[in-house]
Image: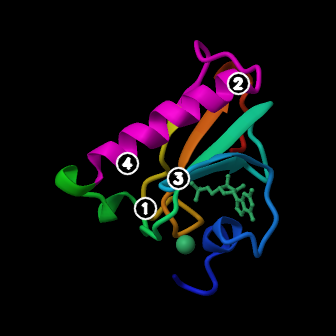
Amino acid sequence: MPSKCIFCKIITKSAPADIKFENENIIIFKDIKPAAQHHYLSVPKEHLKNVNSLSKNDHKDLLDEMISEGKRIVEQEGGDTNDLRIGFHLPPFNTVDHLHLHTISPASSMSLLH
Ligand code: 5GP
Ligand code: ZN
């Protein structure tokens, strides 16, 4: 694990985060700068750099889990899954080099700056 990676630090609990869910594969926490009332990041516990690190054979189940659990957390926290934006910022337009899936609701209220 890269020692400077903030999401690895959150995973090992050496940095704080508002964690909503974790299991052996993924962790989901609230974005520190939410773009809407509900904004969570689904993050694999393995340090994968970005979407270019994914392969269909190795990571399909992981990706399915990141998506389904991300949606489930929006629902659990009282968000509207019918008004949801879900996706990745593709490199080089990402800022954190540890793969993370955004789930944001209500999408219709999102800040234009984000
Ligand atoms: P992206 O790389 O896809 O553009 O977005 C990275 C996201 O991670 C941003 O929405 C940013 O607010 C969030 N983020 C960056 N650093 C931290 C942190 O230390 N804690 C949490 N909870 N979120 C962070
Ligand atoms: Zn990392």
**In the rendered image of this protein, does residue 67 appear above or below residue 11?**
above
Disc 1 on helix, strand or loop?
A: loop
Rendered residue at 52%/66% (across/down): 98
Question: Is the residue indicated by label 2 positioned so its CB lies within 8 Å of ligand 1?
Answer: no
Check if residue 13 falls in the magenta segment: no
Magenta stretch?
A: 59-85
| In this view, the mark in front (1 or 4) | 4
Question: How far, Cα to Cα, is label 1 from label 4?
Answer: 20 Å
| Disc ID at residue 76 | 2
Mark 3 and mark 1 residues within 8 Å of each other at the beta carbon: no
Q: CA distance from mark 2 to mark 3?
A: 17 Å
Task: Count residues near mark 3 (Cα–Cα under 10 Å), then give few for <14, some for 14-19, many for 20+.
Answer: some
User: Within the magenta stretch, is there residue 60?
Assistant: yes
Counting residues from the N terminus, which is met first, the one under dot 1 or under dot 2?
2
Q: 25 or 70, which lies in front? A: 25
Instruction: Return the mark for residue 62.
Output: 4
Mark nearer the N terminus (4 vs 2):
4
- Closer to viewer: mark 1 or mark 2: 2
Which residue in the structure is indicated by mark 3? 26
Looking at the image, tell me whether mark 3 or mark 1 is earlier in sequence order: 3
- Measured in 3D between alpha carbons, the distance from the residue under mark 1 to the one under mark 2, in whole angstroms, is 30 Å
